[in-house]
Amino acid sequence: MILQCFLSSVPMFQTTWKLVFLSFLLLCIAAKVQGQDGTSNITGYSCSDRPAPCYTYAFYKAQAPSYINLKTIADLFLVTPSIIATANGLPDDTSSLAEGQTLLIPITCACVGKYSQANITFVIPPGGTFWKISTENFEYLTTYQALEIANPTLVPENITIGTPGTFPIRCQCPSKAQISNGINMQITYVVQKADTLKSISENFGANLENLKSANGMSSNLIFLNTTLLIPVSEKPTLVQSPSPALSQSPSPSSSTKLFLGIGFGIVACIVSATALWVYFRFHKRKRAASIAGQKLAGVDLEKLLQHIPRRFKMDDLIAGTNNFNEAQKLGQGGFGGVYKCNLAQTNEIVAVKRISEGSRQGIKEFISEVSIVSRLRHRNLVQLLGWCHEQDQLLLVYEYMSNGSLDRHIFPKRGEEEERHVLQWSIRYKIACEMASALLYLHEEWDECVVHRDVKSSNVLLDSNFSAKIGDFGLARMLMHERLHQTTRAAGTLGYLAPECVASGKTSPQSDVYSYGAVALEIASGKKAIDVSLVDFDMRLVAWAWDLYGGGRLLEGADVRLKGEFEKEEMERLIVVGLWCSHPDEASRPKMRQVLRLLNFEVAAPILPPAMPVPSYACTSFTIKSSLPVVSHSLPTTLSPR
């Protein structure tokens, strides 16, 4: 009222100036709201008094055309489609999503300096800018200012397409006070149209006062496309509401507008289709010219493929896969499908990995796999047999692993709890030893150190004798042995990523060791690295297993489906190995040579801290530490003989 009297009493405030002044005032109010306690408009939420890292969720909506598929959304957040499906109660085989379908995306929240965030490695798409990526791809879960800070080497005005960048998703772990009040997680939520604090609290089952307190709010005022923390005791179930376009029928007065809109839409579609046809015509010729010159992303194919003498014909691969029929599909790799192929001429069965057409990241994966895997020779690594580069397509041919991936055997599926589907203990323990042998070869025994960067149970394949072989080297990187202090950009899958990867965005041989530890615990327990049934332990298998270790109840971690049929000493040893490898501090983890000696009972098992330590992250040029006190626990660098 006072403002209205002031504006009306001053002649110079004409209508335009009034609007300008009011806009400025609203911006000030918005800045005040966004400047909530512990929150920065640029960097995000404070780490003060917050245990880290923790697992939580980010709210996301399926949007056409790019993110209407579960796989593309999973790739965006560096998780697997099955993890998102499980978190949202969707069938495992879910592919397409409805426009506007809401999802809870599992993320790992950790402290980076003074602020908490979930760092995602994302490749810059064509036309990508920090603003577009933050608002369109990540739907305001981050800000362009935060992207600029997280990527100091990238020039916002001139970002190279295909360049990987670090994208910090806003998040925050519950404080000690919140945890004591029954709050176990805080969901990162972006305010939607027509939202109110009351509707948000009701939709998520959150207490309104807790919601306001978590965001440092003294009023109920919220703004579109800003982030809120929703404190809850357990993961809520999202209720899918019908699309407004479907729930509202046009009124008679709008029929003319609707008719004109459809007409203009048809014309626009015709024009767009013509433009797309011209573009793809030109693009296809350009790519064909690149193939004719035997160049791929600036790499000489002849030099790249000199280690692989066998070149397969496209016609043979098409015939062997029945034109890449879905019935022949063995699985979906990081950047392409894998198909079973029956080669009639040689009577061979092979596995063909088909790189997704037009995928720049897929081309990088092709180059990485060819340049690294073609030179590796170890009985526990999947062997690359050959390649094919015809008809504008990239294909890699591997040995066929008849028993599929490890995850299919250790995680029970519906209707497969019967005894005949349980992988017996002797095979499980052998698989753990074979994986350790393969990683030892990659890290220490080959000419250069190879960091796999995506060790997980779905990338461990089993042959007809259930021998384990690590596959999928599309994310792998090589390091010179004398330069092991150098690290590579973070990559991997949620649950298998080491804490320092989340915090610093870097990977190393020790991050592979962490991933191995997660798989070792999965083999022993039959539970996934992130298991929704372990709510009391932030859904982390390692936290649950460490609690058993501290309580002297280690054998309770054994897979119940084994019904006690296992060697107790081997079970205890494998779980201890899993915990040692999963130590939050990378300097306290063993080398793979120590792991193999421990599994072979050549040395005594280490004594671990009774409680899972709080991590500290050492980087090449700076050190990031948790805001909580770091409990110092020393582990032996060498183990004494048994």
Image (cartoon, helix red, strand yellow):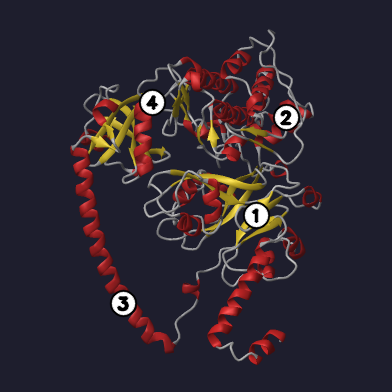
Which quadrant of the view contains residue 260? bottom left
Disc 3 marks which amino acid?
Phe
Rounded to the nearest angstrom, the CA distance separating label 1 from label 3 is: 41 Å
Kindly state the secondary structure of the residue where label 3 is placed.
Answer: helix
Q: Which residue is mark 1?
A: 187
**Upstream in sequence: badge 1 or badge 3:** 1
Residue 203 visible somewhere in the drawing: no
- Looking at this view, name the residue that lies furthest to the front: 12
Kindly state the secondary structure of the residue where label 2 is placed.
Answer: helix
Relative to 448, say whether 411 is above or below: below
Rounded to the nearest angstrom, the CA distance separating label 2 from label 1 is: 31 Å
Q: Position of residue 271 (x, y in %)?
A: 25, 68
Q: Quadrant of the C terminus?
A: top right
Marks 2 and 4: CB-CB under 8 Å?
A: no
Q: Residues within 10 Å of mark 1 (few under 14, many from 20)?
A: many
Disc 1 marks which amino acid?
Ile
Q: Which residue is mark 3?
A: 264
**Upstream in sequence: badge 3 or badge 4:** 3
Rounded to the nearest angstrom, the CA distance separating label 1 from label 4 is: 40 Å
Foreground mark, 3 or 4, reads 4
Disc 2 marks which amino acid?
Glu
Q: Which residue is mark 2?
A: 556
Foreground mark, 3 or 2, reads 3
- Of residue 286 and residue 192, the one placed in the foreground of this image is 286
**Upstream in sequence: badge 3 or badge 2:** 3
Kindly state the secondary structure of the residue where label 4 is placed.
Answer: helix
Question: What mark, if any, has residue 372 been given in the picture?
Answer: 4
Q: Residues within 10 Å of mark 4 (few under 14, many from 20)?
A: some
Rounded to the nearest angstrom, the CA distance separating label 3 from label 4 is: 53 Å
Residue drawn at 59 percent across, 33 percent down: 619
**Upstream in sequence: badge 2 or badge 4:** 4
